Image: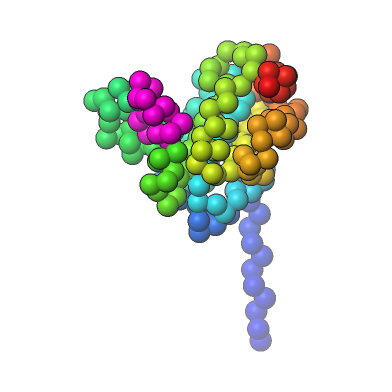
Amino acid sequence: MSSSPLPRKADPLHVPVLGDAIPRWGGGLACWLSRRLMRLLGWRFAGSVPNLPKMVLVGAPHTSNWDFPLAMMMVFALRVRLYWLGKHTFVNGPLKPLLLVLGGVAVDRRASSGVVAQVAAQFAQREQFLLGLAPEGTRSFVPHWKMGFFHIAQAAQVPILPIALNYGRKIIEIGEPIWPEVGETAVLAQLRTFYDGVQGKRPELFSIDSIQSSLRDK
């Protein structure tokens, strides 16, 4: 007699399955603990991670100190290798080995080449590189987003992947990749649509009108 295959156990977190092009990182214990904590706190994922080796990940809203540990919990739960930018004096300081392991990339804002060119060079030098940025740049309310993420994606010729930390529904929402070739106005319009209805930890500090302001500034 042939036995029927056992049904797959339902995943309450809806953790996306990563393709082979996505850089991996993190041990099994960190992954298990992060997924366990997400489940205890009631958080889950929505959407899928495109199987692309290089992307600029845009994370918002950024309204609370809790956003960073939540983002790290996401990284460990996915076991994805994510990099972030830091001042060269900070990343190259006494904690340099630890910060490099955690994904820190040193940039010198005084350099004549500029931050965009420095980061684009990092993309060119690596086969896999996922860079996470917070376009608001601060936990306080901002009238419009900083556009560094767009200029970096444009210079490196990589897509932008929006990610929302939606505290209202306790969902980490992963959007569709947006290619910078469509232009800054079109990129911002798509981001505005994606973040419409998303609620930050402190809702009064985030509004999609901040993205619309960037459109009006053009």
Q: Is residue 41 magenta?
A: no
Q: Position of residue 101 (x, y in %)?
A: 33, 39
Please tell me which residue lies in front, 130 or 149. 149
Extreme left residue here?
94
Residue lying at 51% horizontally and 38% vertically, measured from the top left: 155
Q: Position of residue 2 (x, y in %)?
A: 65, 83
Q: Which residues are magenta?
A: 104-119
Q: Is residue 13 left or right of residue 30?
A: right
Q: Is residue 102 left or right of residue 160?
A: left
Residue lying at 68% horizontally and 13% vertically, measured from the top left: 204
Residue lying at 54% horizontally and 57% vertically, measured from the top left: 19
Please tell me which residue lies in front, 150 or 196. 150
From this view, report whether residue 143 is shown above or below residue 33: above
Q: Position of residue 76 (x, y in %)?
A: 47, 42
Q: Position of residue 163 (x, y in %)?
A: 61, 36
From this view, report whether residue 138 is shown above or below residue 45: above
Which of the image's four quarters has the C terminus? top right
Residue lying at 63% horizontally and 41% vertically, measured from the top left: 181
From this view, report whether residue 161 is shown above or below residue 151: below
Which of the image's four quarters has the N terminus? bottom right
Q: How is this picture coloured?
A: rainbow
Q: Is residue 114 magenta?
A: yes
Splitting the image into 4 quarters, where does residue 46 fall?
top right
Please tell me which residue lies in front, 1 or 29. 29
**Exactly how many numbered labels are in the figure?**
0
Task: Look at the image and tell me whether residue 150 can be seen.
Answer: yes
Task: Look at the image and tell me whether residue 30 can be seen.
Answer: no
Splitting the image into 4 quarters, where does residue 117 fall?
top left
Extreme bottom residue here?
1
Splitting the image into 4 quarters, where does residue 87 fall?
top left
Please tell me which residue lies in front, 165 or 135. 135
